[in-house]
């Protein structure tokens, strides 16, 4: 049997069906993995009798935005590495993406209709999967294991039910994202560690100083930068807690300087004085490899963000783990709500998968669906499947979702090498990504209990 059987045992009594709500990438992948393990699945998808404002078809795993799964390079890009890991683990989503591939250089891009049709056909042809076209407002108590994989466009009744189960403040409906920077790309000869008024740990914040001319040039660049527009179904969700930094600047040139860029309580050790304005970064993950720019949620286009934010002193060579944004995205505060099996701590029969857990991107969503499906199948067989090691791409993403992120500032994240534990012993920066990829392959092979050569072949 393929790697999908790891952690499972043959049972003489058929397990109860696992219910999955949501037929997107995560839900379809979870259903496939469960069925491959010999456990029956009921997959509930509302599209058919119901519509959404973003989807155009009734096909499962419809790609709403881009047709790209991003880089397919497993040596130098973490998303390429997660592609390889998913191929190794028998991913339906990657199998269908490879079959529907269109030219895109080193990226994996697909014919979106051919891709969705292939996923739908595979799910419909699998005898252990029952596809029900219906809206589920709440999973009834008689259902045993449930995986909620409804994504960023979770229907109102189910979203209300999730909010009631998790607490209103644990469910977000708009994703206010500040850019996140790799720590080793910050110029610490210019920036310095200090908390405002020296409260808390002295290394809680990194500070990037600006003089008056630098600040005014920065504000002008933000105001003139090209912005993205809200989709009609998103509305315009400005509120004080997540106002884009450039919208703040439109209210007055000094508004950011009295908001997230205020310099009070901070002394630049290089000058012994207070700067005109300060950009602060706050640690974003437990490893300290990623830092978010505080208060810098933005609707600047991604290329503009890189250009404008690299004018900040200390960030001239910044490498971004993710860029900022503000859009509709229903997700839960997974680090405080979910255990390492993706189960709701308060109600363990419920698992969450895909973007609703706080991962970002097609591939990441499917990867979380893959591991949620395997864990649920193992549990149905009376077994326990431990999470992949955090040195693997899937394990690093899962660790970020369930324990690695700061709960108070938790935001959806694409997979990136900043989520991986540092190499021990340290490796030169030019060799770091290939070294992390090699370590991931070896550790995945050990986790799967298969020879490394067989894992390499399956990933190709």
Image: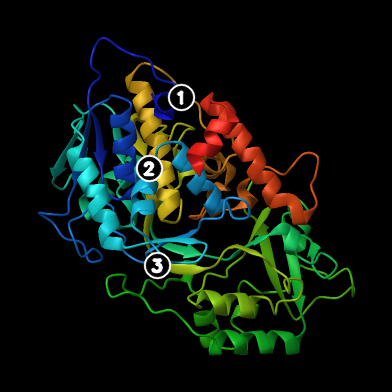
Q: Quadrant of residue 439?
A: top right
Residue 49 at least partly seen: yes
Q: Badges 2 and 1: C-beta atoms under 8 Å apart? A: no
Q: Nearer the viewer, mark 2 or mark 1?
A: 1
Residue in the foreground of this view, choosing between 16 and 135: 16
Q: Which residue is mark 3?
A: 327
Residue 171 at least partly seen: no
Q: How many marks?
A: 3
Q: CA distance from mark 2 to mark 1?
A: 16 Å
Q: Quadrant of residue 209?
A: bottom right
Residue depicted at 55% across the width and 27% down the height: 447
Q: Label 3, secondary structure: give it.
A: strand
Q: Which residue is mark 2?
A: 353
Q: Which residue is mark 1?
A: 385
Mark 2 neighbour class, 10 Å CA radius: few under 14, some 14 to 19, many 20 or more:
many
- Provide residue 436's location: percent of width, then percent of height: 67, 45
Q: Is residue 94 above or below residue 142?
A: below
Q: Label 2, secondary structure: give it.
A: loop
Q: Label 1, secondary structure: give it.
A: loop
Q: Badges 3 and 1: C-beta atoms under 8 Å apart? A: no
Residue depicted at 19% across the width and 61% down the height: 57
Which color mode does the image show?
rainbow
Q: Which circle's residue, 2 or 1, is located before the other in the chain?
A: 2
Residue depicted at 16% across the width and 48% down the height: 135
The residue positioned farthest toward the top in the image shown: 12
């Amino acid at each position: 049997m393929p790697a999908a059987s790891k952690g499972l045992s043959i049972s003489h009594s058929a397990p109860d069906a696992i219910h999955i709500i949501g037929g997107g990438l995560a839900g379809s992948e979870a259903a496939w993995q469960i069925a491959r393990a010999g456990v029956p699945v009921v997959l509930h998808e509302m599209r058919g009798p119901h519509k959404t404002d973003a989807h155009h078809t009734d096909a499962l795993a419809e790609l709403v935005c881009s047709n790209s799964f991003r880089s397919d390079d497993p040596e130098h890009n973490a998303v390429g590495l997660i592609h390889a890991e998913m191929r190794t683990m028998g991913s339906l989503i990657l199998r269908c993406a490879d079959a529907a591939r269109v030219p895109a250089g080193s990226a994996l891009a697909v014919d979106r209709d051919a891709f969705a049709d292939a996923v739908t056909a595979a799910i419909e042809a699998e005898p252990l999967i029952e596809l029900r076209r219906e809206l589920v407002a709440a999973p009834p108590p008689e259902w045993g294991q449930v995986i909620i994989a409804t994504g960023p466009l979770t229907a109102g009744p189910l979203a209300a039910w999730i909010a009631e189960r998790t607490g209103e403040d644990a469910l977000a409906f708009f994703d206010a994202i500040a850019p996140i920077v790799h720590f080793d790309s910050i110029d610490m000869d210019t920036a310095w560690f200090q908390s405002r008024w020296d409260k808390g740990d002295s290394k809680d914040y990194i500070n990037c100083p600006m003089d008056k001319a630098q600040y005014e040039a920065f504000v002008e660049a933000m105001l003139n930068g090209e912005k993205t527009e809200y989709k009609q179904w998103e509305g315009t969700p400005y509120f004080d807690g997540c106002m884009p930094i450039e919208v703040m600047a439109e209210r007055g040139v000094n508004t950011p300087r009295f908001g997230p860029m205020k310099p009070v309580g901070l002394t630049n050790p290089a000058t012994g004085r207070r700067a005109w304005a300060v950009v602060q970064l706050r640690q974003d993950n437990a490893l300290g490899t990623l830092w978010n720019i505080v208060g810098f949620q933005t609707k600047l286009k991604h290329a503009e963000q890189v250009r404008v934010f690299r004018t900040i002193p200390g960030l001239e060579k910044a490498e971004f783990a993710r860029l900022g944004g503000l859009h509709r995205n229903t997700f839960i505060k997974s680090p405080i709500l979910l255990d390492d099996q993706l189960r709701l701590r308060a109600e363990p029969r419920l698992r969450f998968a895909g973007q609703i857990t706080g991962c970002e991107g097609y591939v990441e969503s499917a990867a979380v669906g893959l591991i949620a499906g395997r864990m649920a199948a193992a549990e149905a067989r009376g077994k326990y499947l431990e999470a992949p090691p955090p040195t693997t791409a899937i394990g690093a993403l899962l660790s970020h979702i369930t324990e690695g992120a700061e709960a108070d500032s938790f935001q959806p994240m694409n997979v990136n090498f900043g989520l991986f534990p540092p190499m021990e012993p340290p490796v030169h920066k030019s060799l770091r990504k290939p070294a992390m990829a090699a370590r991931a392959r070896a550790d995945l092979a050990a986790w799967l209990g298969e020879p490394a050569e067989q894992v390499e072949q399956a990933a190709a």
